[in-house]
Image (spheres, rainbow, N blue to C red):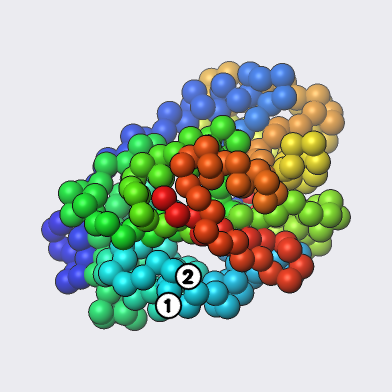
Amino acid sequence: NQNLPQGLQLFDDRPAAADIKSEVLEGLAKPQKTLPAKYFYDERGSRLFEAITQLPEYYLTRTEIGLLRQYGQDIARRVGQGAVLMEYGSGASVKIRLLLEALRPDCYVPMDISRDFLIASANKLLDDYPWLSIYAGCVDYSQPLELPQTLEQASNKLGFFPGSSMGNFTPAEAQAFLRRVRQTLGDGSHFLLGVDLDKDSDILQAAYQDSQGVTAAFNKNILRHLNRTLRASFDESLFDHQARVNKSCSRVEMHLVSRIDQMIHIAGTTLVLRRGESLHTENSYKYHTESLNWMARQADFNIEQVWQDPRGYYALVLMKA
Ligand code: AVI
């Protein structure tokens, strides 16, 4: 905890560095070739994602912020005083500010894999909320967590996982994640989850294949990232971005479709792609109230309240442990 400003403490679970080479090669060896979606997010990718959240077609972020504005006080009333607010994922956004203002928690625990990002965003929050105490966790929240004792013992925790981020997990991963969250939070705590709801295919299609091509640039950015980190030879102009609504799986898939027959060098091997063949880069699952109910129960949560926008596009789900 060297050189941290007053009000900020840090715990570091020392998340293991990913073995990017084997992860990528494993996905490329499958009949439907895949790339791990987490490699969208280098610096440029994170900026492009920010731009996506502002797009007219990408209703998710805007709708969630609207729900937090509208129901923040209601959430705070249900959770009560003296809460420890634990956010799974980054915490620099307007969303956490809305929740901090409504809830005024005893402690805010942002959890993220990037230590530098955690410290930078915690510093900004402390500037704006001098009353706040932050205990930041450098962790990979897709893995089991080890909390410091003071946090572990806190009886009134509120877990927060916004942004439809759970939608990028497979159903099995989502289920396992919920179980771990339940264990971390302990009896009597709450969990606030932001999920995108299943809806008309055209709306989903447009949200993931926008008219300005920002999502296309975001999708293709994974190729640039791999060119840099794995000395790959992808030429992004030889790929088309495609969003596919897969109704039977309740998900939107993102693909990069090869425009020609081509050979790519990557991490010392050669990859052959046929014209029209795709690299499947991301799944974004869309939920139904029934599936949410079922998943919550499997993880030993009870759904206390579901808030939706008037169009029924998006939901904030408050679960009680
Ligand atoms: C981060 N995640 C919730 C976004 C989503 O909607 O699945 C990522 C994204 N992919 C394309 N557009 C946005």
Badge 2 crowding class, 10 Å Cα cut-off, few under 14, some 14 to 19, many 20 or more, is some
In the foreground, 26 or 187: 187
> Residue 221, position in %: x, y?
62, 47
> Residue 233, position in %: x, y?
62, 33
The residue sitting at 60% across, 71% down in the picture is: 67
> Residue 136, position in %: x, y?
28, 58
SS assignment at label 1 = helix
The residue sitting at 81% across, 62% down in the picture is: 211
Amino acid identity at mark 1: Ala
Residue to which mark 2 is pinned: 75
The extreme left residue here reads 2
Indicate yes or no: mark 2 CB to ligand 1 under 8 Å.
no
Amino acid identity at mark 2: Ile
Q: As displayed, is residue 226 above or below residue 128?
A: above
Residue to which mark 1 is pinned: 102
Which of the 4 image quarters holds residue 91?
bottom left
Q: As displayed, is residue 149 above or below residue 211?
A: above
The residue sitting at 74% across, 51% down in the picture is: 198
